[in-house]
Amino acid sequence: MSVPSHNTLELGPLPLATIEWRAVLGPERVSTDEHALQKAQNTTFASPHHVRAILFPNDVQQVQECLRIASRHRIPIYPVSTGKNWGYTSSAPTSDAVLLNLSQMNRILDFSEELGYVTIEPGVTQGQLYEFLKSRNSRLWIDPTGASPECSLLGNIVERGFGHTRYSDHFAHSCNFEVVLPDGQVIHTGHGDLPGCKTAPLCRWGTGPFADGVFSQSNFGVVTRLTLWLMPAPECVEAFFFRIDHEDDLPHVVDALRPLRMGGTLQSACHIGNNYKVLSGLQAYPWDATGGQTPLMPDALAPLAKKFNFGAWNGSGALYGTKRQVAEARRLVKCALAGKASKLRFLDERRLIIASRFAGITRLFNSWDLNRALELVRPLFGLIQGVPSAQFIKSCYWRKRTFDENNMDPDRDRCGLIWCSPLSPLKGAEVRQMSDICISTVLQHGFEPMISLTLLTERTVGCVVSIIYDRDVPGEDERAKVCHEQLLQRLLASGYYPYRLGIQSMPVMQHAGPFGQFLRRLKNELDPEHILAPGRYEA
């Protein structure tokens, strides 16, 4: 069997396949326009792969036919949801391919207020579901990421992304996948495959082997719908914020938070961002203060940290429950962080309103620009209550000289953004070692090490390192690529492997040994022509 190359698309059968796709979808939903193709293959870093056509199916039957045609003609096809996977791929494929854009499949198919679930298609966005719940005066919350309200929910789930509330592990709060296999066959996972089963949207495991994971971070099938569980709004919610003034205090704070996470006091993902990360959320690169030089070194960062009142590391989290439960959790957080973190503050809706009202007066009595700080706090407080925000996309423009914050598109505007996402045990010394590798490596290559640490589970810390630059500056794409590759290699050498990959990382992270052989056997069985997203999380 001849397998298509990961780097080139055999163009011989493409015109014939395009005729067949147009017969299935209609001419207006098969695009070969050069401008549209160029836009689709744009991403926030240099990618060598090309989009040869774009297909826009609007139901599962059309997805089936698209895959059957691709398989028959042995043409690589790459599925995306809304194509806003910034920092990892956007909508760029892992090889020259035809793009299967699922954004028009944007229906909310089922909803239960009583049992707290919703069944959605790939094109349903964070903003769309939020407005859906709001229009019904629902007491249920989504768990948003910090990405745009226009980003797909399903796309983030199958990438095993995370958010901010008690339901921050998105994959763990989903089930009932509908999947189109490369040969066009449709399967349903869990209890969804059992006729008339009343628990299909309610039980992850079903009966027999658990298959959902096979279709996350893989190229074994196209997920065309799934059920997402929603969080019931609690009686009380409080955010808390703290500061870590010195790098050496980070391990102590991590170790202090671990018992709270493992014991259930902290039920949500707790985030700790470094000084560069916080500054990028407050303003663009300080070109005047640095005389136009990059990177921003720690000495030049110090006066800005003092101006905006943030530390070397800055943490946030949320407490949920009844008023009594939140009060007790607040007491335990205070005890745990006493003497280890400074400026511990708790914030609820009432306190946020008061802070907003008196921000100007506060500025009269000290140098802290509370108004600027609130620009970051307000959307963050919204995220922990299920409200998506576009505020955090601004950090993608960190090194852009000018941009329109009312019309942001990181791909179109040639923002440079590469994410590297290693995991470490939830132990202070390990987190410190991992973050030290990230800081030293990124600075060494001339970029600012923007790092967020997330107490992702009761036992692990997820780290997202943002390498942000301006793609319009000659040579920056290549320097950022080298930086990312060396950072990943150094992390792997120390045992810190990523929880998620972008297309720039996948060639480095191929599975070897018996598990890799198992994945290859599975791929060969499900996709013998290797037409579905070749090179994506592939052994």
Image (cartoon, grey):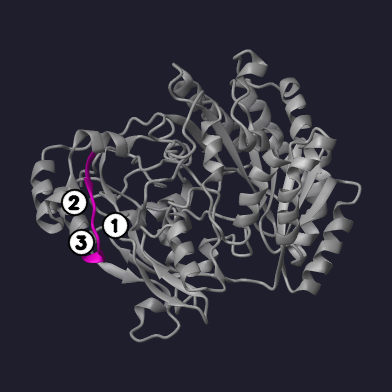
On the image, numbered disc 2 is attached to which residue? 29
Amino acid marked by disc 2: Arg
Task: Measure how far apart labels 3 and 1 are at the Cα level.
Answer: 12 Å
Name the residue at 69% across, 57% down: 459
Name the residue at 35% across, 34% down: 42
Left or right of 538? Residue 423 is: right
- Residue placed most toward the observer, 307 or 30: 307
Name the residue at 52% across, 82% down: 114
Amino acid marked by disc 3: Gln
On the image, numbered disc 3 is attached to which residue? 62
Q: What label sits on residue 373 in the rendered view?
A: none
Amino acid marked by disc 1: Gln
Disc 3: CA contacts within 10 A as few (<14), some (14-19) or many (>=20)? some
Q: Residues at badges 3 and 2 in contact (C-beta under 8 Å)? A: no
Whether 431 is among the magenta residues is no
Q: Residues at badges 1 and 2 in contact (C-beta under 8 Å)? A: yes
Region in magenta: 52-61
Task: Measure how far apart labels 3 and 2 are at the Cα level.
Answer: 11 Å
Provide residue 20's location: percent of width, then percent of height. Answer: 10, 52
Find numbered disc 2 in the image and state the secondary structure of the residue it sits on. helix
Find numbered disc 1 in the image and state the secondary structure of the residue it sits on. loop
On the image, numbered disc 1 is attached to which residue? 104
Which residue is most to the right? 339
Q: Within the image, what quadrant is residue 67 found in?
A: bottom left
- Residue placed most toward the observer, 41 or 107: 107
Pointer 3 or 2: first along the chain: 2
Provide residue 244's location: percent of width, then percent of height. Answer: 80, 41
Name the residue at 73% across, 28% down: 304
Which residue is most to the top? 291
